[in-house]
Every structure is written in structure tokens, then in C-alpha cells.
Image (cartoon, coloured by chain):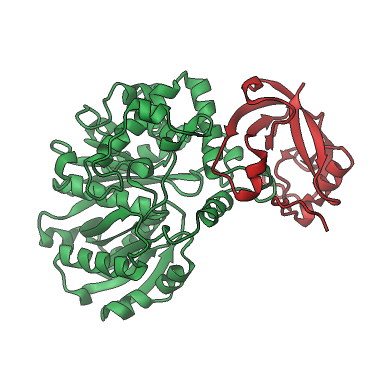
Chain colours: A green, B red
Amino acid sequence: MTKSGLAIVGIAEVPTRRDPERQRWDILLDVCMGAIRDAGIDKNLIGAVISNNPMAQPSMQNDMSLGKIPEVMGLKGCRDIAICNAGGASTTNCLRLAEQHIASGQVDYVLIPHTTVQSDMPPQDLINFFATAPLDKQFEYPYGVSFNGSMGLITQRYMYETGATEEELASVTVALRAWGALDPLSIFYGKTVTLDDVMNSRMISTPLKAKECNLLADGGGAMVVTSWEKARELGDKAVYKLGHGTRFMSATPMLREDVFHRQAYRESSRDALCQARLSIHDMDLRQIYGAYPYTQCSALEGYGVCEDGQGAKLWAEGRCGPGGDLPCTTMGDATGRGHTGSGVSMAFYLDSVRQLRGEAGDRQVDQCEHAILTTSGGSVMNTCTTVFGRKPR
Amino acid sequence: MSDYKKPLPEIQPYSQPFWDGTKKGLLLIQHCNACDANIFYPRRDCPECWSQDLGWIKASGRATVYTYSVTYEGVEQKFVEDLPIILAWIDLPEGIRMHTNLVECQPEDVAIGMEVEVVFRSITEDITLPFFRPV
């Protein structure tokens, strides 16, 4: 019997920190067991484990790809195992694969875990990894480009085309850090920044300053997903996937005609909203994983929340941060929470679940019924947009 | 043995003519003889029509700055001595966009839309990288 619809019914996450004492497998077991307990199901009901591929964590990649999780945890009902790697967007692909398993009717519950520890790796190795992973080794890498440099190039052009100022873009980071400061799971919990703090931080790659770039950190999270039918049996904790759309642009940033991914945000959100039979104006929360401030602006333009070029103004006016009328990215994005590699997308899904359940504490969005979420992988090679709701439609 | 420590371009068989060109002071762009597309970066097959009938055309060497970013920190150790590095994407009249460094100028002299021209720098016996400088 085939089943329709995916629901997230259990979540767990460890705080994002830099703590080399915290072991990868300890994080993994804590979040996997936590998510299964949160779902309130027996461990042996997990029918598949679809892992988010942790970037730059080769030994974990092997363990997670080759079946260690169900073996170590004694998941006796596990029938299948896989790992998904689409960079930062990997969690989205895990969900899509899980959805297939569940729709087939052969598996009821799928566990989707992630773990990453970067604090025990030499900074130069991480710079090297993030410089080479998404960039062209022949025509970009020999020129000293870093991930920050690549995103600096796009940000400079965004300012040129839209007239957005450095202060307006800095206000994005102020708001993201304000969300992070309210979130016990953020590495910046309790640590707000002012516009001056951002503007006066060290210049890294113009126009991006140190506080607008990502702090690499450790973290982990997991979720349990099931069918809408099974989710209804588990009660109020379920959050329902209502629609989804994706667009791929290019692996190499310089080859991207849609340089701010505005069109990709537009088309992927249109697909997701159409499938959900909702409009962008029905969304109570917009969660954007772009890892750099301009994406928080161009996504709002692509979604149709504002005109093209006006996104930065919404942030500067305080409308997207805590207390604003258009709450965006309560998860804080990588700049407001710490960058855990492909784990950022996991944290985005988990935060959206918390918001829709009404469990987001001081960051709780009022009457959060519907949320739209976009993740991206590589150097924003794609936009993967999903609409979630408190109820199935 | 060269003492050049920075990463060298990972050359592929079908991009070798590009690097043979830079060594001779020529900026060559891959061209599809079947569909007339100009292709960058070089591929084995034309990404438009999959033809393997690919040749090379000589670029004028002039370009326009599409965007730039001045990097002050956060690069691998081997690039630190070059800081600040002016990264740029430049648009060639042949319809392609390249990543490069702007040289022979100061960060404050750079602007989007600025006209630039290619300048070749030999970094090892075998490899010459194309850079661009203000016209």
C-alpha cells in the first residue's frame, strides 16, 4: 500500500559549539536516541537510516555510509541505509529519499541524522577544504579565492545592482545574531551585536566583514519522519511537509547567470507553494539558509515578499528580526548560529519544527501555522524550498 | 623544480591548448564548430550541443569588470604574502565570464564596469596564468 505525505515526528539537537572534547559519535548517538524518544516510538520501528553526509569528516562519512548507526544502536527493524551528499542542502535530499521509502509503504519510520566536529581540525585545513570543495580547481583556485572571497564578489555586485548599502547588509547580521542570542542552541546565545560591531569588524573580503562571515563550529541533529497517516496517530508533535521545489544553477559561482539566485528562489518557492496550495502571504515564517547576508535579501525578493532589490531594506527596517512583522530565519543562519557544514540545513529543519510546534522559546513566532524554508548546497549551487505546516492539507 | 608554492591549475587534456596559449601570450577561448558557442571553462564536449568538434578562437584580451572583491584575510597560508588580493569576475566581449585577479592597480582604483586587459605572468616553466590590469 502506498502512502501520501511526509511528516516530521521526532527531533533532537545538541547545542552548536566549538568543543573538541565532544566526540562525533557521542553527538550522533545523543541526537539519534533523542529524536526517536521525542517521536515516542520503539527503536525497532525505524525502517531506514538516511544520513546527512558530514562534510570534511571522512571517518564519519564511512561509518554513516556503511551501516554503523543501526548496528551500534541495535535498530533491529532497519531495512535500508544510505547517505546523501548535496553539500549544505543534504538534509533536503535525505528527506526526499525518506519520502520515497515511506511512500512505498515498506518502511514506516526513517531516521535522518547528522554530526560534525570541526573544532579539532587545524584552521588551515578547514580553509583549504572550504576553498577547494565548491570551486573550480583550474580557473578559480589558483587565484587565491576563498569561500568568503567568492561570496564577497557576489555581494559587491548585489550592492551595485540594487543600491543596497553596507549598513543595510550589516543589519542582516545584526538581526540574525539577535535571533541567535535568544537561542540556547546557537553558539552566539546571549551575544548580540550592534551595527557598529559589524561595520567595525575586520574586513575579510570586501564588502564582507568578519562578523558577516561564518564561524565554523560543531553540532549535530536528527529527526524521525513518517507518513501523514502514522503522524496523525502520534498526535500534536507532527509537522507536515506540504510542498517542495528545487532548482539547480551551477557548481561554479562565476558561471551563474542567476547570480543572486533570485530566479531560483522564485521558481522553487512557486513550485513548493503551488503544491501546498498556499501563497507566500500565508507563510508565518521564512527560513533562508544562504550562509551569507545577501541571500537573506535576494531570497525575499525571489519569494515575492518584496520587489527585486528591496530585500536589504526590510532587514534594515527591523522587519525580519525579533519583534518584526516578517520574521525570517529565526534559526540565525550560519552567521547567527555557527556553521556546522552540511549540518546547517539539519538545524534549519529542526528549528522550523520547533516554531511550528510552538516550542521555540523566546524566538517563538506568534501563531506559526506555516513556514517556508530554503536550503542550498555548494556555493549556492541550488535552492531547495519546502513548505511545512502544523496540519496536513 | 619550481619554487612556486601556490596551487597550480589542474589541467585536463581538453584544456591543454588554453595553457599552451597563455604560455605564448595568447588568450584562447574554446569554440564549438558545430553550434558556434564560445565555451568557458573548456570541456571535452560542447555543453550546448555535445559536439566534439571543438576548436579555439583568439580573444581580444580586453574585458570589463563585472564584480570584484578585495581579500584581506582568510586565505590559505600560501597566499598570505599576496594579500590584499583583488579578486574579480570579468566579462569578455566574446561572451564569457572569467575569474581572475586584477593586478598593477590599487584596491581603491577598482570599480565595476572598469575596462581591463589581459597580462600574462609565467609562474612555472610550464604554466602561465592570465591576469588582468586596468587599460
Q: Residue furthest top?
A: A163
Percent x, y for residue A188? 30, 44
- Name the residue located 24 percent from the left edge and 37 percent from the top edge: A285
Residue A369 located left or right of residue A336: left
Q: Nearer the viewer, residue A266 or A215?
A: A215
Quadrant, the N terminus of chain A: bottom left
Answer above or below: position of B134 versus A205.
above
Answer above or below: position of B48 versus A108.
above
Percent x, y for residue B131? 75, 35
- Name the residue located 73 percent from the left edge and 47 percent from the top edge: B42
- Name the residue located 77 percent from the left edge and 50 percent from the top edge: B15
Q: Nearer the viewer, residue A240 or B69?
A: B69
Q: Quadrant of residue A108?
A: bottom left
Q: Residue furthest right?
A: B24
Percent x, y for residue B129? 77, 42
Residue B93 located left or right of residue A242: right
Answer above or below: position of A182 versus A185.
above
